[in-house]
Image (cartoon, rainbow, N blue to C red):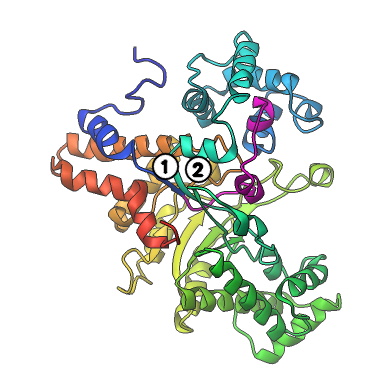
């Protein structure tokens, strides 16, 4: 029997072990998509309670605690403390088979050196021991990032955000914003007119027309670029892909601003036009456009009304995306607005995405279109393996920009190690079976690129 999470965890062949320990393990981390609070990074906040650091805001854990019968009062109904941690510790033994079981123990081991299995018997010992360690050095926000060899993090920021945290940030870890204009594109949202007022103030421009909105987005895009931003990010259930006349879109804009009804066709055309404008801005400044597709959000209306978004009530959408995504990419391409793109689907249709990518690779940039890493409900061993195989089968695995955390937690970075072990297990298995040459410099360079250098060279973040 192998030890739990031993040094060769997941590495079942000699080539896998060599690739991980010699080529992957020590690579830096460029986490190009996460939801860390930038002010906590910039201010290098200290943490002194494991329950707050580990369970506050982590809806992955909240979902499983609910599944284990933990009452909401112990999850989000109070500031996390010993009782919340005990409820989590009682849930952990029930997680066998879930990636959270691995992540939990990797996080305890990598940040605290704690290798004891978390359960109700060890709960208080681990909680008190970790809290004692956190009162010493090494547990501020930036220290936690440095402990995991994180070179850069790209936070998720609204165009109206002032980027003050990014401006004042000092430290060895690069802190870059990401341009997330979802609220600007959500033209049918009840809060859209109020949002445009906020965006206009940020851009020093009153937004009265569609051209005004584009100008405001352009000003904020320029400000983000000056702050080190090199990526936009877009959450789409299905990408919009409809053309319309300028008059039709201006009429739809005015109607939404005044709270009047708009046809579905006009709504989709207006959203397509706005996303195309952002594509043009990205192309102009050499940014990468991330399309996160296929998440049904806030399905439990009662809990949304109580807790708000991002609290664990989202799911995978099964709406077809192939035709719409292909048409959207073609619209961008026709208008010279197709920047570097990363495609993610929460519904793991990796072969579909990989086949679409091949239609728009144009030789201008190696790996211009990327198959995004296994995301959210897919970032487990099976999901990562399926994504890697799809890319290898239909594209260039060697050009892949690798893993991200998509997390709000400063303790989530062992997920990169998890991914690297899955990667080395897969590629090392190919070496073991004679499917690729036993050429360690060749295959090791592929692994090293996927772990860090491909992302560094692809995104070209200032400071790296």
> What secondary structure is marked by label 2?
helix
Residue 308 left/right relative to 6: right
Query: Which residue is more in the foreground, 262 or 431?
Result: 431
Q: In percent of the image, x 52 and y 22: which residue is there?
A: 96
The x, y position of residue 385, in whole percent, is 38, 41
The x, y position of residue 402, in whole percent, is 39, 49
The x, y position of residue 126, in whole percent, is 59, 15
The x, y position of residue 258, in whole percent, is 86, 78
| Marked residue nearer the N-terminal end (1 or 2) | 2
* Residue stretch rendered in magenta on the structure: 31-53
Query: Which residue is more in the foreground, 207 or 426?
Result: 207
Q: In percent of the image, x 52 and y 73: which residue is there?
A: 328
Circle 1 residue: 384
The residue carrying pointer 2 sits among few (fewer than 14), some (14 to 19) or many (20 or more) residues within 10 Å by Cα, namely some
Query: Which residue is more in the foreground, 159 or 290?
Result: 159
Q: Is residue 414 visible?
A: yes
Mark identifier at residue 378:
2
Q: Is residue 45 magenta?
A: yes
């Amino acid at each position: 029997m192998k030890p739990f999470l031993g040094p060769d965890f997941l590495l079942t062949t000699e080539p896998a072990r060599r690739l991980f320990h010699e080529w992957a393990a020590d690579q830096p981390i460029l986490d190009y998509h996460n939801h860390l609070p930038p002010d906590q990074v910039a201010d290098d906040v200290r943490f002194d309670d494991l329950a707050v650091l580990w369970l506050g805001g982590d809806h992955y854990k909240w979902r499983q605690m609910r599944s284990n019968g933990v009452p909401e009062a112990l999850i989000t109904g109070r500031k996390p403390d010993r009782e919340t941690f005990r409820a989590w510790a009682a849930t952990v033994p029930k997680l066998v088979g879930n990636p959270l079981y691995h992540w939990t123990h990797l996080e305890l081991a990598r940040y605290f050196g704690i290798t004891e299995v978390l359960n109700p018997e060890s709960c208080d010992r681990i909680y008190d021991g970790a809290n004692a360690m956190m009162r010493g050095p090494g547990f501020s926000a930036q220290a936690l990032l440095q402990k995991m060899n994180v070179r850069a993090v790209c936070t998720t920021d609204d165009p109206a955000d002032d980027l003050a945290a990014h401006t004042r940030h000092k430290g060895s870890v690069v802190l870059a914003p990401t341009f997330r204009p979802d609220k600007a594109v959500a033209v049918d949202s009840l809060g859209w007119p109020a949002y445009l007022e906020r965006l206009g103030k940020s851009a020093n421009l009153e937004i009265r027309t569609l051209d005004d909105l584009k100008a405001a987005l352009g000003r904020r895009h320029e400000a983000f670029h000056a702050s080190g931003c090199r990526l936009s990010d877009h959450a789409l259930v299905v990408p919009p892909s409809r053309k319309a006349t300028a008059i039709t879109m201006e009429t739809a804009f005015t109607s939404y601003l005044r709270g009047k009804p708009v046809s579905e066709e006009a709504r989709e055309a207006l959203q397509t036009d706005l996303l195309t404008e952002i594509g043009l801005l990205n192309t102009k400044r050499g940014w990468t456009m991330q399309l996160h597709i296929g998440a049904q959000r806030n399905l439990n209306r009662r809990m949304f009304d109580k807790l708000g978004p991002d609290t664990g009530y989202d799911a995978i959408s099964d709406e077809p995306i192939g035709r719409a995504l292909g048409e959207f990419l073609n619209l961008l391409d026709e208008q010279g607005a197709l920047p570097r793109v990363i495609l993610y689907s929460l519904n793991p249709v990796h072969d579909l995405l990989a086949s679409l990518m091949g239609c728009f690779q144009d030789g201008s940039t190696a790996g211009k279109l990327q198959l995004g890493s296994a995301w959210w409900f897919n970032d487990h061993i099976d999901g990562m393996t399926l994504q890697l195989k799809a890319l290898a089968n239909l594209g260039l695995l060697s050009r892949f920009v690798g893993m991200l955390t998509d997390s709000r937690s400063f303790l989530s970075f062992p997920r990169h190690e998890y991914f690297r072990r899955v990667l080395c297990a897969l590629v090392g298995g190919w070496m073991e079976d004679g499917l690729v040459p036993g050429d360690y410099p060749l295959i090791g360079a592929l692994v090293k690129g996927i772990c860090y250098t491909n992302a560094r060279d692809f995104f070209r973040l200032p400071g790296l």
